[in-house]
Amino acid sequence: MKRILLDTDGGRGVVSPRVLLFGVMKKRISPAKAFGGVLLVPGDKSISHRYAILASLAEGSSEIFNFSAAADCTSTLACLRGLGVKIEEKAGSVVIEGKGLGGWKAPRKALDAENSGTTMRLLVGALAGQGFSSELTGDKSLRRRPMRRVIEPLRKMGAEIRARDDEFAPLEIQGAKLHGIEYAPKVASAQLKSAVLLAGLFADGETVIHEPVRTRDHTEIALRELGATVELVAVRNGDRNGNAIRLQGRPKLVGRPLGVPGDLSAAVFFLGAALAVPGTELTIQSVGLNPTRTAILDLLVSMGAAISVIAVATRNGELVGDINVRHAPLRGGKVSGAMVARVIDELPMLAALGPYTEEGIEIRDAQELRVKESDRIAAMAENLRLMGAHVEEFPDGLRVAGRSAGRLHGATIDPHDDHRIAMAFSIAALGAERETVIRDAECVGISFPGFYDLLAGLVKLGA
Ligand code: S3P
């Protein structure tokens, strides 16, 4: 088997600023024959954001190993530098000099989260409790994404935040004295939960969150690693059955070495590659297997995928292991209800696998996809149709017909500047007839700068 590894720096800096600015890169993907290999994917994006933010609020320095090279995480580092945090980027790690909960300085200009929803939504929570005012802005896509879901609970905690149309960035935050709340969000969002928890660090008393559906719990785990008291408590009263997350305000966070597992949401594209190309077998090493993220593995297995997880260990409270995938025909099926939040970032890849399945893929109750980096439902439907798939679009999802509707063919894909759309169609292209062209392909750098290099190490990309 071929052994393909990313550089030890996880591909940091592979995408030049010029390419990022002007969007000039086209990638040609040829149909692939069976391939195999052992690979590493970049550090988890969600965890990297949290480690950087929390380390900056801890006392003492933290070296974060395998920190994600994603442009989104670089945006978080840039915002933290704007708040006076000293950060050293080394090959393979990032060292954050924490100054304690009261250590951030008033920024001299607006903090730019660029394309990163996680950066903006998490930072607004922490900024709400500071003794200074600040402004958070972002690129065109981020300035269109909903922010009231975070502003609302923060206001209940005493925050003073102004937004365009009371919904969109730029956000003006007047630091205020915060108090803990008990809150039951309507939207299942880990970013929302994390914003409230980060504000809760600066609040008097306890902050309690009742999630409608359990979302990724990396913030809770990282907080515990650094010394905060965060509990998951069973709640049984009236309509509040389930779990609540309880955080004690004003903890002392202490910096420490932290290791970021590989990003399962990046690994999923390579699982998709094995499922789209008969005869393929891949092993992806050291991937984060936090149970709030692994629903995609269960789902693919329930559809017939040959996936096994090996050598599982715990690092900094997070499960990590190797994933082996062998090509097997997929039955297809439906994703809806509570499942959606648990596979939200994997839905582009799943939809793009629809034409490779027996029964097709249907995704419903997923209106959140319309307010991601792009309107992912529209982008999926448009590009799948360009490749010859039969697609029905709904306000809350789509239905993609299976194999009997015919084989996909190459097309020119517009990813709408959305990394996960570009990667999903690069993979769909591997099993299609003729060559596919991915326009503005550099957008993959938002989460996975080394994506095409890694793919090119496994299959021959087009000229
Ligand atoms: C993320 C949470 C999810 C996910 C996003 C990353 C996080 O967003 O889609 O890519 O790191 O907390 P929502 O919280 O909006 O569901």
Image (spheres, helix red, strand yellow):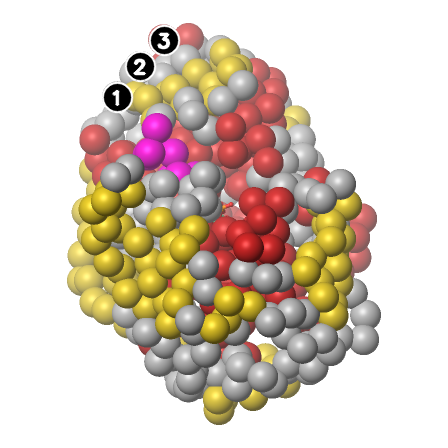
Q: CA distance from mark 1 to mark 3?
A: 12 Å
Q: Are marks 1 and 3 in contact (CB under 8 Å)?
A: no
Three-letter code, disc 3: Ser
Residue closest to the far front = 238
Residue 296, picture quadrant:
top left
Residue bounds of the magenta highlight: 337-344
Q: Earlier in the sequence, mark 2 or mark 3?
A: 2
Residue 455 visible, this orientation: yes
Q: CA distance from mark 2 to mark 3?
A: 8 Å
- What residue is rendered at 64% in x and 69% in y? 176
Local packing at callout 1 (Cα closer than 10 Å; few below 14, some 14-19, many 20+) is many
Three-letter code, disc 2: Glu
Which residue matches tag 2?
Answer: 359
The image quadrant where one finds the C terminus is top right
Residue 206 image position (x, y, % from top left): 39, 67
Three-letter code, disc 1: Arg
Between 88 and 337, the one lying in front of the other is 337
Query: Is the stretch drawn in magenta largely helix, strand or loop?
Result: helix
Query: Would residue 240 be counted in the magenta stretch?
Result: no
Left or right position of 211 against 432: left
Local packing at callout 3 (Cα closer than 10 Å; few below 14, some 14-19, many 20+) is few
Local packing at callout 2 (Cα closer than 10 Å; few below 14, some 14-19, many 20+) is many
Which residue matches tag 3?
Answer: 404
